[in-house]
Amino acid sequence: MKESPEIQSPLIVICGPTATGKSITGIQIAKEVDGEIISADSMLIYRGMDIGTAKPTNAEMCAIPHHLIDIVEPDQEYNVALYQKQAREIIINIINRGKLPILVGGTGLYIGAVIDDYDFSRAPGNAEYRNKLVQDAKKHGAGKLYELLHKIDPGSAARLHPHDLRRIIRALEVYKYTGTPISSFHKVDLSRKSIFNPLMFGLNLERKKLYERIEERVEHMIRSGLVTEVQELLNRGFSPELNSMRGLGYKELTEYLQGKRSLDSSIDILKRNTRRFAKRQMTWFRRDKRIKWLNIDQADVPGEIVTEIRSFLLEEYPKVCRK
């Protein structure tokens, strides 16, 4: 399907909390609708971090083209503004090649940055204050900075992981020099129209079952060699203070490998942190009323989504629709 410039390009979005099968669902859908997948996961960008991120396998990525996976090293800088630019360019390229773009992931800010008119160019910064916060974090821990952010900007704190040091520092920096929460700089400019026409699906599960799946997923990661993966990253010289190494699974098992706690205790903490992460994801996504929620326990989710996609394309793009 090729779009003329005046027509909003179609974009399918598969989102939701962790452990709901977004990746495999996206692959199944892409096979049916001649699609390509753009990852919207802030951890899948890192090379060498495969098990802890539940990265699609090489076979899966060969079967269906995937984009924005394995694009930077764990110690390379990357941010949502760069993601926004790269993802939009890739989506337009997919459309121009006659394919259907499918945005898949659980990082709500990434998804919003792609489909809505988020403007990341206006938020100011200050290198001196930023460096001070970095030193404070090294001395007192990221938790202290997170507590500070929660006091002055609870809305932004609620959307960030307590270990996401880079984004915590950025939020504190913006608030100090503007008196305005960083979230205000991310708001959509309703006077401008998104370049995409999104059809959004959210995958969900009853909470008890979701938490059971999270526990099973963590156990599977441990059996698959997550401890070894983390050890290899440390052996390669990647600092535990890196944003990537503070991701779920990597921080908890780094602390085990440093002798700070037992393996069983680290696994229990990882399960708890993942449950909390899933809750934050749902808080983010539930604000978006465009999302149609599907219970993965009660429906043929891929089949239902494919049916809706085909109806959507026929209705919205009757002159250019392939199917």
Image (cartoon, rainbow, N blue to C red):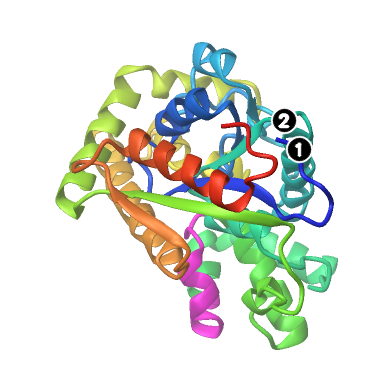
Q: Is residue 120 above or below residue 247?
A: below
Write down the quadrant of residue 224 in the picture.
top left
Is any part of residue 138 visible from this angle?
no
Q: The N terminus appears in which quarter of the rendering? A: top right
Q: Position of residue 7 (x, y in %)?
A: 75, 55
Mark carried by residue 98: 2
**Chief secondary structure of the magenta portion:** helix
Q: The C terminus appears in which quarter of the rendering? A: top right
- Helix, strand or loop at mark 2: loop
- Helix, strand or loop at mark 1: loop
Q: Position of residue 208 (x, y in %)?
A: 15, 50
Q: Is disc 2 in contact with disc 1, using a CB cutoff of under 8 Å? A: yes
Residue at point 27%, 40% (across, down)? 214
Residue type, label 1: Lys
Mark carried by residue 2: 1
Mark carried by residue 258: none
**Disc 2 versus disc 1: distance between alpha carbons?**
5 Å
For marks 2 and 1, the one nearer the N-term is 1
Q: Position of residue 146 (x, y in %)?
A: 51, 68
